[in-house]
Image (cartoon, rainbow, N blue to C red):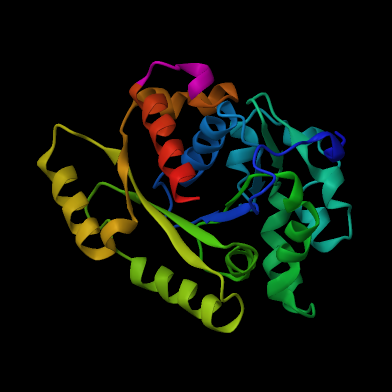
Amino acid sequence: MNIEDVTRKNTDKECNVISILNQKGGVGKTTTTINLSSALGEKKYKVLIIDFDPQGNSTSGLGVEKNDLSNSIYEALLHDADVKESIIETSAQNVYIIPSTIQLAGAEIELVSLMAREQQLKSLVDQIKEYFDYIFIDCPPSLGLLTINALTASNGVLIPIQSEYYALEGVSKLLESVKMVKSKINPNLEIFGVLMTMYDVRTSLSKQVVEEVEAYFGNKVFKTYIPRTVKLSEAPSYGIPINQYAKLNKGAIAYKNLAKEVIKRG
């Protein structure tokens, strides 16, 4: 695709670059990346997803066939491929992706020997952010060098937290990493928001976990909670977001409401 053809909705505002991060797996990180992006795309915002997880779930969840790729985030990050040529238009309205493949798994080791190794992703983002209203970086479930690169390239962090036991386990370590990057590398980095996922209105546990998270994070917690619903789990197997798969589903409605909150926060 020709990136020059992409026209932002808000040309008077700088692109918002947000890492979607939790080092715990299975908390709805990729689900949020795909479906929040699609909900914003429906509102005419130009959105880029950078799949920065070697598992490549955002890539496959948007119907991109990994075996057909000539360029991915790995080639752009470590082998001087043109990052603009790595961008793919998806079936979701106004949503684009830089895909990931399993090759990215070796990037942590390859980055170690590079100068300014924490800045590699930022240098790529700086080349393309003028074309987008939002860039979401789907981070790996770890706090290694890939995640440090994502935080260095971002101005915000969105933390999905599962509405289940041990929800806050490991969050203090995550916040330490954010604080370290902010103090030593990227002073513009802030917690953009905390999102409760897999919320079950029928259980007292979900309500208790929300209370605990709100006591910890205060007004950083989004008012929208993402419900536990089978349709959200099914949509990626069809390579489409929930608003294409089941637009009246409560999950689709929740991400539409989350998009409104994200726009309000900037």
Hey, which quadrant is residue 167 in on the image?
bottom left
Q: Is residue 252 visible?
A: yes
Name the residue: 83% across, 51% down.
Answer: 83
Quick check: 48 left or right of 183? Answer: right
Q: Which of 114 and 133 is in front in this view?
A: 133
Q: Which of 12 and 215 is in front in this view?
A: 12
Q: Nearer the viewer, residue 90 or 256?
A: 256
Residue 179 versus residue 8 in the image, above or below:
below
Quick check: 262 left or right of 91? Answer: left
Q: Position of residue 65 (x, y in %)?
A: 73, 31
Q: Where is residue 235 in the image (x, y as percent from the top left)?
A: 50, 24
Quick check: 29 left or right of 196? Answer: right
Q: Is residue 23 visible?
A: no
Name the residue: 75% across, 79% down.
Answer: 116
Q: Where is residue 175 in the image (x, y as percent from the top left)?
A: 41, 71
The range drawn in magenta is 243-249
Q: How many labels does the image show?
A: 0
Residue 59 versus residue 220 in the image, above or below:
above
> As drawn, which residue projects farthest toward the front?
12
Query: Quarter holding the N terminus?
Result: top right
> As drawn, which residue projects farthest toward the left?
204
Name the residue: 70% across, 56% down.
Answer: 104
Residue 142 versus residue 129 in the image, above or below:
below
Q: Position of residue 227 (x, y in %)?
A: 30, 33
Name the residue: 21% across, 53% down.
Answer: 165
Residue 69 versus residue 77 in the image, above or below:
above
Query: Is residue 47 located in the magenta-colored stretch of the structure?
Result: no
> As drawn, which residue projects farthest toward the bottom?
184
Quick check: 109 left or right of 29? Answer: right
